[in-house]
Amino acid sequence: MRQLKKQSAKRVQDALETYGYELRVIEFDESTRTSIDAANAIGCSLGQIAKSLIFRGKSSNEPILIIASGSNRVNEKSVKQAVGENLGKADADFVLLHTGYAIGGIPPIAHSKPVRTFMDEDLLQFDVIWAAAGTPHAVFQLTPQILLDMTKATVISVL
């Protein structure tokens, strides 16, 4: 297996191994920073990209991770009921503090602190999905069930 270039991608790979799944982080020369970039680099549909979006709970000031299908835009007002509070924008410093990763490569796992997690129900329609792996050039392939198992996410509609 090829050695991973970035430490943050290696941290995700190490976490995948602790879960016991034979999943591999793949690094690309081209960007996988956005859902469109990732789908183009991988050669999959936009909906198969599991984008990790960190929000700030307006009441709790805690991080909230929403793993959304790449083809969906999170409707913050609609998600409020499932989350239990209004969602606010999380700036780059907040995201880095709570996840240990910079925006553009946030994985759904291996965060520096526990993060309450919700998953878009639309991801369940796919046999295979792809998630960021710690850098804007790294991803890993998995199934929606494995993602649920690893994240213990609550499945919701994000629309």
Image (tube, helix red, strand yellow):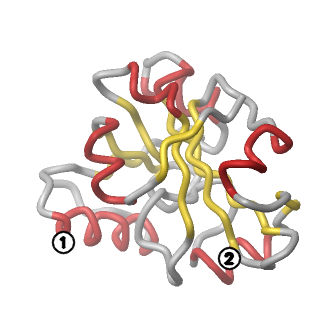
What percent of the width, then of the height, locates residue 68? 59, 38
Mark 2 or mark 1: whose residue is earlier in sequence: 1
Q: Residue at x 53, y 21 (%)?
A: 47
Disc 2 versus disc 1: distance between alpha carbons? 22 Å
Q: Circle 2 — which element? A: helix
Q: Is residue 76 above or below residue 84?
A: above
Observer able to see residue 102: yes
Residue to which mark 2 is pinned: 96
* Residue 41 visible (yes or no): no
Report whether 24 appears left or right of 58.
left
Question: Tag on residue 8?
Answer: none
Front in this rendered view, residue 14 or 79: 79
Quadrant assignment, res 30: top right
Q: Residue at x 49, y 42 (%)?
A: 155
Residue type pointed to by label 1: Thr
Q: Position of residue 85 (x, y in %)?
A: 79, 62
The answer to which quarter of the image holds residue 92 is: bottom right
User: Does residue 36 lie above or below 68 as drawn?
Assistant: above
From the viewer's perspective, is 155 left or right of 148?
right
Q: Is residue 92 above or below residue 127?
A: below
Of residue 101 and residue 118, the one placed in the foreground of this image is: 118
- Under circle 1, the secondary element is helix
Per the image, the residue denoted by label 1 is: 18
Q: Residues within 10 Å of mark 1 (few under 14, many from 20)?
A: few
- How far across and down, in percent of the image, does residue 6 sit? 44, 68
The amino acid on which the numbered mark 2 sits, given as a three-letter code, is Leu
Q: Nearer the viewer, residue 123 or 130?
A: 123
Judge the density around disc 2: few (<14), some (14-19), many (≥20) Cα neighbours within 10 Å. Answer: some
Quarter of the rendering occupied by the N terminus: bottom left
Q: Image point 45% across, 44% down: which residue?
A: 131
Q: Residue at x 61, y 59 (%)?
A: 65
